[in-house]
Amino acid sequence: MNLRAIKRNIPFVATASVCLLLFLFASLRYKGFLKLPYLLGFISDDAYLGIAAIGLTFVILTGGIDLSVGGVIGLTSISLALLVEKHHMNPMYAIPLVLVGGVLFGTLMGCLIHFYLLPPFLVTLAGMFLVRGLAFVFNQESIQLTDQMLGGHSASHSLIVFNSTIKIPLANTSIPGTTLIYFVIFLIALVVAQFTKFGRNVYALGGNEHSAALMGLPVARTKIGVYVISSLCSTLAGIVHLLYNVKGDPTSGTGLELDAIAAVVIGGTLLSGGVGYIAGTIIGVLILSIIQAIINFEGSLNSWWTRIAIGMLLLLFILLQKLIQAKKFKTAGTFQKT
Amino acid sequence: MNSAFNSPTWHKLKWPLAALMLVLLYNYFYTPGFFQIEMKAGRLFGSLIDVLNRAAPVMIISLGMTLVIATGGVDLSVGAVMAISGAIAALLIAKGFALPLVLMISLGVAIVAGVWNGLLIGYFKVPPIVATLILMVSGRGVAQLLTGGNHIPFKHAGFEFIGRGYLAAIPFAAVLTLLLFITFVIISKRTAAGLFIEATGDNEVASRYAGVQTRVVQFAVYAACSLCAGIAGLIATANLAEADPSAAGIGLELDAILAVVIGGTALQGGRYFLAGSLMGAILLQTLTTTILTRGVPTQWTQVVKALVIIIVCLLQSEVFRRSFQRKPATA
């Protein structure tokens, strides 16, 4: 491996080491941490965060940002629950309906950002308020899915039993269906980012938009595309949240945008765009889950510490990125991108 | 600049003013008693006074936010800073500290929060959105930690005056806003600070080469913005006579940004306009009050505001404007 490749991988290696260290620390300090059901438990708990963070990785790779991910999760969760539980719509139609909604929302934001040159943070911040507001307009309280029979069948039945029917047994426990969805999305995203034309365009756009345009790459399609992917992923995350908790909630995903950004940045993706890996984001999510688990195990620590800890860890990794970038500018004159 | 209608001030002020007039006109016809102002026990009462009183926190924050946006940055942490300053003030009042000390400590902490933002953005070159997002989320965590997540009620006539009191028949919060506005205008127009802020926003690198201490400018604007947020936090807390760390200032960052953008300050930085931001904040509050008095559920206000900000930004976007003009004859 040449020197440049090593340098490019410093953030990723740092992330992997931090994850390993935290894992070792937790497994040595707490009894019961190293049990398979527990480990699977916290991966499954954060599956929806992981899915949203995967989508966000694409946006950040282009140098943009999406603050609406949490809001989209809330809106998806409540509208799907409302459609199925209150309007007795078949989930076979309701799920595609919310997915289409997510895609349209992403397209709208992408178009505003690309064609009208509006700052991504502003458009997605307004988007966040829009979807969160809509979620509360639809229903102010959470809706529990019930196995209520109506005309011989229950519309929400298939949603409620999803995790208990679709699962992979493993030792004395099992991997729930929602976690499998997470793995599948991860694999698809990995392939899209590393082995497709679109993926290469995303990296090129993040490296230097002007050069990408001069090279004749489809800037418009790629830029709008990443916001569509992010919205689609958050919608899927909202669906997973509903399936996992069997409850639609307009407040779900509140403040999740920071967690998702933190996972992406901790995972080694540069905020300036062009450098990063989908796999890094997964490790970033894992680090956040382990921190949460440690705070739970400590018992004496308040849950508000989680927010503060995530903020501080994010800060640490951003400063690390700055350090690496500063060195890169001094040593190599040119930027080498993936 | 000879007549008042040719001055740049008027030119920038006319759109928010026109929108405000439109909303007021609507209220004139459809909301009975909207323009009634009564004098009760030496205090003015009425919907318009209420609008001024309620708009005070957003107006004050929008002053600081204007300066931050003028340097090309943004501050998402204002809501969290409001929560922190309110929580600290309530805790100290409950412990029986003297009022001047309470004000000094809570506003001092707000300034520290701003210096923290300025440090990350000015020295470590962290993108403003992310730097302030960190404080937005962990700051609220800090506020909740301080109060143990509880509401902190208190009774203190002197402190409650900040949010509920009247000075010469006018709500004290509105008077405070006016005083802050005058201070900000004097600093921008009578000292070189305004020039430095605009230069930093226009081209940071060029300004630095020209001898402007851009880092100091960034420090100062983020500190000023946090101070404004701290004052707004005190007003909100005093008005409720309790600190509510999980609800104080939620969503206010969008309101403040919206007020600044409506007021004609460009998000790219480089030019700013304090009077416009105040006008924007008043417009927003009038809109909210109108929505509420029309009996529309509260949840809708967020949706309406989000749509308004997108429309205003589109109107400001060069590309959007050009798409409505005919193709120019010359290139």
Image (cartoon, coloured by chain):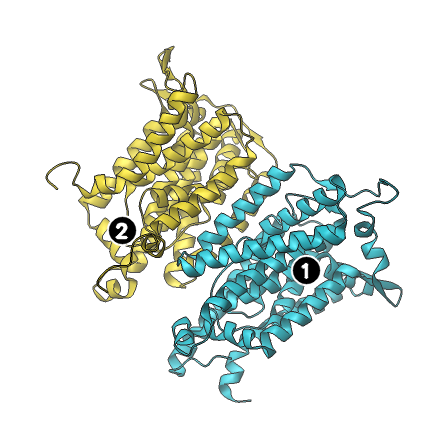
Chain colours: A cyan, B yellow
In the image, residue B205 sits, relative to residue B81, either above or below, namely below
Judging depth in this view, the residue of B244 and B58 nearest the camera is B58
The residue under label 2 is: B271
In the image, residue B295 sits, relative to residue A82, either above or below, namely above
Judging depth in this view, the residue of B137 and A196 nearest the camera is A196
Q: Residue at x 22, y 52 (%)?
A: B195
In the image, residue A326 sits, relative to residue A129, either above or below, namely below
Disc 1 marks which amino acid?
Ser
For label 1, the SS is helix
Q: Residue A324: give its label.
A: none
Task: Check the image and name the residue furthest to the bottom.
Answer: A2
> Residue B49 lies in what quarter of the image?
top left
> Within 10 Å of the Cα at label 2, are there few (<14), some (14-19), or many (20+) other Cα atoms?
many
Q: Quadrant of the N terminus of chain A?
A: bottom right
On the question of residue B60 being in view, the answer is yes
Task: Check the image and name the residue furthest to the top.
Answer: B41
> Within 10 Å of the Cα at label 1, are there few (<14), some (14-19), or many (20+) other Cα atoms?
many
In whole angstroms, how far apart are the C-alphas of marks 2 and 1?
44 Å
Marks 2 & 1 on one chain: no
- Give the x, y percent position of residue A48: 68, 57
Task: Check the image and name the residue furthest to the left.
Answer: B2
- Give the x, y percent position of residue B158: 42, 23
Query: To which chain does the residue with label 1 belong?
Result: A
The residue under label 1 is: A289
Q: In the picture provided, is B144 more to the left or to the right than B284?
A: right
Q: How many marks?
A: 2
Disc 2 marks which amino acid?
Arg
On the question of residue A31 being in view, the answer is no
